[in-house]
Image (tube, grey):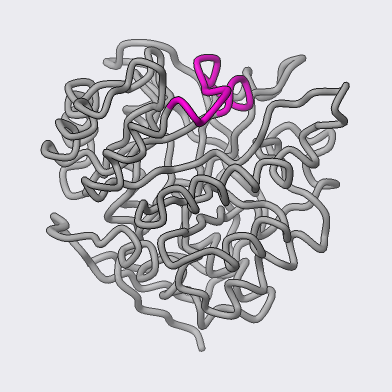
Amino acid sequence: MDTITIPTACDMHIHLRQGSLMSMVTPTVADGGVSICYVMPNLQPTISTTEMALAYRSELEQLAPKVTFLMSLYLNPALTPEEIRKAAKAGVRGVKSYPRGVTTNSESGIESYDIYYPVFKAMEEEGMVLNLHGEIPSDPEKNVCVMNAEEKFLNHLKDIHLAFPKLKIILEHATTEAAVNMVKSLGETVGCTITVHHLQLIVDDWAGKCHNFCKPVAKYPSDRAALRNVIKEGHPRFFLGTDSAPHPSHKKEGPEACAGVFTTPLVLPYLATILESFGALDRLKGFACDFGRQFYEVKGEKWVGQVTLVRESWSAPNSYSFGGAGVDGEQGEVVPFMAGKSLAWKIASIE
């Protein structure tokens, strides 16, 4: 098979940033073969009200008019059931939870879920989605670090699901066999996103390699195998969420690397190449196009096109420039995932 034609994909976990970086990244959503995406709220300041979410969506739509942007709010103590009902009425699709300090702009993240049960109840009633960054903060005294923080989080997922069985919950960017098994063991209202890079990387690939460093970090070969196997299985509650998170190269290459891998401009070429490497190319459409739309019950997309990929050996760009003449704000370069490395599939057309 040398040609693949599928619908434009859905990326149910993306970071589009702000300012000049947003201006570069957002138009590349469609370039990567994606027509709908679920946007993360961890900006500065965080997207914590309906008005902020709608204003941000308006900015994004100006940069990529054909793309459908599903918006989210940042879970925080000021969020009320009343704001949830207001957000749902305005079309905001969900709420994202970040444990305190585990990733970019999560300093105001949560420490206990119990106080949010009234918010979760309102979300359940309104049909909104709860997106969980599935890690607990590192704590040397409790033997918690980046390698086991996800597995130690999973009981929180189970407890919330049991308390609110009709609330749609997504465990975001799973990296472990334990996470796959937990999601599979729970009800039909629990889904899970898997990134492009976690299908490729293991711990050896990010240790000392700043451009592969992300949170949650890639884990052991057995964990990567579990992610791959659940895709080969065609499980409908596991779907694409790239967690594409661009940072200027100087913030990745400094003494303390920012966490994030940038995949947005090349989502489908990456996925086709990686899925084929472990015998799952036939699962591309379900994983990248169908299952996320089904779980989110997507209606009224602005545009769903057809993407044709062709088998062609080529190299991912070494960098993407942002800012500069005519654009306010910072300027620099972002190094994408697998920069300079060979890909086996290329987008020939998007119609």
- The quarter holding residue 261 reads top right
Check the image and report above or below for 343 versus 252: below
Magenta stretch contains residue 113: yes
Viewer-side residue, 19 vs 3 = 19
Magenta stretch contains residue 85: no
Q: Position of residue 89 (x, y in %)?
A: 11, 39
Q: Residue at x 16, y 59 (%)?
A: 303
Check the image and report above or below for 170 versus 21: below
Q: Which residues are magenta?
A: 99-115
Q: Position of residue 193 (x, y in %)?
A: 51, 55
Q: Position of residue 9 (x, y in %)?
A: 35, 62
Q: Outermost residue toward the front?
A: 163
- The quarter holding residue 280 reads bottom right
Q: Position of residue 322 (x, y in %)?
A: 42, 25
In the picture, measured across the screen, residue 183 lies left or right of residue 277, that is left
Q: Residue at x 16, y 30 (%)?
A: 58
Instruction: Please give the count of numbered marks on the rendered protein.
Output: 0
Viewer-side residue, 351 vs 233 = 233
